[in-house]
Amino acid sequence: MALIAPSMLACDFGNVEAEVRAVEAGGADMLHIDIMDGHFVPNLSFGLPVVEAMNRVASIPLDVHLMIAPYEPYLEAFRDAGAARIAVHVEAGDHPHRALQAIRDMGLKSGIAINPGTSLDAVAPLLSVADQVVVMSVNPGFGGQKFIPETFERVAALRAMIGDRDIDIEIDGGVGEGNARDLINAGASILVAGTSVFKADDYGTAIRALR
Ligand code: DX5
Ligand code: ZN
């Protein structure tokens, strides 16, 4: 059992309102919002006005994944746009500990995201200020990429590192029916799913298959 967070990056942007309503009706637990800056990652996605628009329609929490550097100047703006959770990348700045505290001080859930090429040791000192670790199972920047299988071992190792602390492990990238069960068994509590939900004929069926 895991919470399912459809990645809005894969939705039909000509129909954002209908897409938000459709994944909610399908049982989504939160909306995963991918913010890319063309600098930290080699792609641009969308910005604050689009997040605000999604938030106006959504009744489930917004899970904002910042793939931007620097991230400090934008934390409050994303709070104001409706974020319930904000994750910053451990690779994207020198002061992730301060950022996670700042996110918590705003009353939101704090997340630390980690790229496939970064040692898990990088997040160990941050676990005391993190509500969520976003384990990237692809290199960030694009939807629809192939899942990196080493993720299973990383999730299990991270779960052991977390112990009995109340910290979510969220998996992001290439998640589908073929790997969801094993990810949950390894310790994942939130699954992000872009392509596997939005390219499905029926969003509800796709979400149930992941859970
Ligand atoms: C990748 C993003 C992901 C992506 C997931 O940089 O962080 O959230 O949209 O999309 P799929 O599920 O299609 O890999
Ligand atoms: Zn993401």
Image: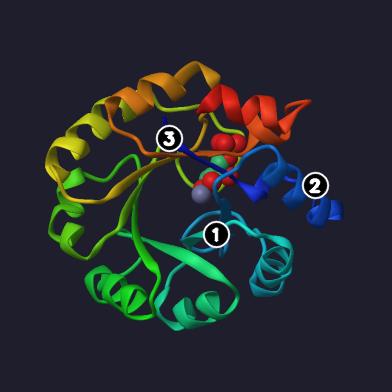
> Which amino acid, by three-letter code, is at mark 2?
Asp
Q: Is residue 164 left or right of residue 83?
A: left
Residue 61 disc label: 1
Figure quarter occupied by ligand 1: top right
Residue 1 disc label: none
**Mark 2 vs mark 1: which is more N-terminal?**
2
Mark 3 residue CB less than 8 A from any atom of ligand 1: no
> Which amino acid, by three-letter code, is at mark 3?
Ala
* Image vertical order of residue 185 relative to residue 36, above or below: above
Q: Between marks 2 and 3, how big is the CA–CA gap?
A: 25 Å
In the rendered image, residue 47, in percent from the top left (x then y), is placed at 65, 69
Q: Are marks 3 and 1 in contact (CB under 8 Å)?
A: no
Q: Is residue 103 visible?
A: yes
In the rendered image, residue 105, in percent from the top left (x then y), is placed at 32, 80
**Disc 2: which residue:** 12
**Disc 3: which residue:** 2
In the image, what residue occupies the spot 72% across and 69% down?
Answer: 56
Q: Between marks 2 and 1, how big is the CA–CA gap?
A: 20 Å
In the image, what residue occupies the spot 52% across and 31% down?
Answer: 174
Q: SS for tag 2?
A: loop
